Image (cartoon, grey):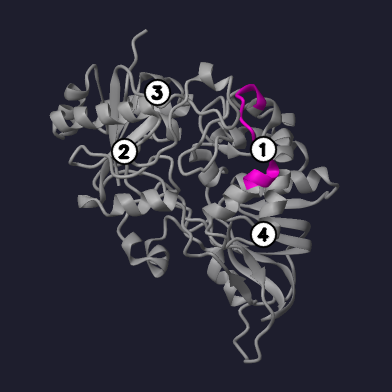
């Protein structure tokens, strides 16, 4: 069977994830009232959700399923979905049936350990425990509403263990295709072109949150009371260069894989009413478009299936490392740009959305494919001799199960059936290649 490898150009900056927000105790000094208490409320709902991405839609659906009858979602864009709809769609959780079939040993405790380690143990252990203990139930909840995942799990880019679940269809938009109709079916009201401009608290820095003020497409203000709660699910600030640079100046001029709506609008509004923020400097990164390009090609989905090289055609990092480790390695390269390379087997394991993106990249010049490494190198603009040497050394490390950068060794499926521990896809490259640039 012919095997093809695709190469894509990436600019290195992924979704910026805002820190957890909670209401802090009121300080002793006086500040101007930012709440702008309305003379009257235009409408009243039990729950108001700000943001119609995956988190906002899931929150509304769950609330409705638990008996809340009157729910409103406000979305500043003209469409729902947010960053979830353009994400790779990987869902991390231990999964007894799928992992057992691949001879992968996992548990909520192991998921907890990996998650804590991935954040340098800075995360709130109780929150992480809640997430990891309920992640499989969340997967089953999605499946009960029609979400379909592939039968095999994998170690996602930046992940630390093979427990990622890939959607069958086109990227993270699969979640939205399930959650939006479910929300509407349950009577949730969704208003687009509705930008929240104030979160209204009883007092400037004390008391419960009472509701929100939003402006519609025409700029008209609306005051919405929330009897029970306001849920802020507006995502991060990856598309806000100044806010990114506040936490790390290196990120000011990077392009982003976020939708333009990811500007962190609610963060200062919540801070104005006494909210505290944590973990703001922990920003998630993904390879994206290089400077001057507009089409992003994703070939780095499965850590076992790709390698990354610099303009010198040499590897510079273990591809199954944490995202922040890979981030710093890419940012240290000349021009802050490298390349992702996969072969035909790796390409076949990408989901349909990623495959279509790579094929489009061939047309736009953001991806290349070739029958030989040397031919691929010429299209990439790197030294063919060195790239061939790099791939040969990588394959030798896979064969000897001792990678020069410490990447988890490839273990063929047949031998793995007779061993314990996590089963990994075979990493070794074989035939037909593709590549892309990453910054």
Which quarter of the rendering shows the N terminus? Answer: top left
Q: Position of residue 339 (x, y in %)?
A: 28, 38
For the residues labelled 1 and 2, the Cα–Cα distance comes to 35 Å
x%, y% of residue 91? 59, 38
Instruction: Give me the C-alpha separation between circle 2 and circle 4.
Output: 33 Å
Residue that carries the numbered disc 1 in the rendered image: 179
**Label 2 neighbour load within 10 Å: few <14, some 14-19, many 20+:** many
Relative depth, front residue between 144 and 300 = 300
- In the rendered structure, which segment of residues is drawn in magenta? 100-111
Q: Nearer the observer, disc 4 or disc 1? A: 4
Q: Residues within 10 Å of mark 1 (few under 14, many from 20)?
A: many
Residue 76 visible at all: no
Q: Residue at x 17, y 24 (%)?
A: 374
Q: Secondary structure at mark 3?
A: helix
Badge 2 is on which residue?
308
Callouts 3 and 4 close, C-beta under 8 Å: no
């Amino acid at each position: 069977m012919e095997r093809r490898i695709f190469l894509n150009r990436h600019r290195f900056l992924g979704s910026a994830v805002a820190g957890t927000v909670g209401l802090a105790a009121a300080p002793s000094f006086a500040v101007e009232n930012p709440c702008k208490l309305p003379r009257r409320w235009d409408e009243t709902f039990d729950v108001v959700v700000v943001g119609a991405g995956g988190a906002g839609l899931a929150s509304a659906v769950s609330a409705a399923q638990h008996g809340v009858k009157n729910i409103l979602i406000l979305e500043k864009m003209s469409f729902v979905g947010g960053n979830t709809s353009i994400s790779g769609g990987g869902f991390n959780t231990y999964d007894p049936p799928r992992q057992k079939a691949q001879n992968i040993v996992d548990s909520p405790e192991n998921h907890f350990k990996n998650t804590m380690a991935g954040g340098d143990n800075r995360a709130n252990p109780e929150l992480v425990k809640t997430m990891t203990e309920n992640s499989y139930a969340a997967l089953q909840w999605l499946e009960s509403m029609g979400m379909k995942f592939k039968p095999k799990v994998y170690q996602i880019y930046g992940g630390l263990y093979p427990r990622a679940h890939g959607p069958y269809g086109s990227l993270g938009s699969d979640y939205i295709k399930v959650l939006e109709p479910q929300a509407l079916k349950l009577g949730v009201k969704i208003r687009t072109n509705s930008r929240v401009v104030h979160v209204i608290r009883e007092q400037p820095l004390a008391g419960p949150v009472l509701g929100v003020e939003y402006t519609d497409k025409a700029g008209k203000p609306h005051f919405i009371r929330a009897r029970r709660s306001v849920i802020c699910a507006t995502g991060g600030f990856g598309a806000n260069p100044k806010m990114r640079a506040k936490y790390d100046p290196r990120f000011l001029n990077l392009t982003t894989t976020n939708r333009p709506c990811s500007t962190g609008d609610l963060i200062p509004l919540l801070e104005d009413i006494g909210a505290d923020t944590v973990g703001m400097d922990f920003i998630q990164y993904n390879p994206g478009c290089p400077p001057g390009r507009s089409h992003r090609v994703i070939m780095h989905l499965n850590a076992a299936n790709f390698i990354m090289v610099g303009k010198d055609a040499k590897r510079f990092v273990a591809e199954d490392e944490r995202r922040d480790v890979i981030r710093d390695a890419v940012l240290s390269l000349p021009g802050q740009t490298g390349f992702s390379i996969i072969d035909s087997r790796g390409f076949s394991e990408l989901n349909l959305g990623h495959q279509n993106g790579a094929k489009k990249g061939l047309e736009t010049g953001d991806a290349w494919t070739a029958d030989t490494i040397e031919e691929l190198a010429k299209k990439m603009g790197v030294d063919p001799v060195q790239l061939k040497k790099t791939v040969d050394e990588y394959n030798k490390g896979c064969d000897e199960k001792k990678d020069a950068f410490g990447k988890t060794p490839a273990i063929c499926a047949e031998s793995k059936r007779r061993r314990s521990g996590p089963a990994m896809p075979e990493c070794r490259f074989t035939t037909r290649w593709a590549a892309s640039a990453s910054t």
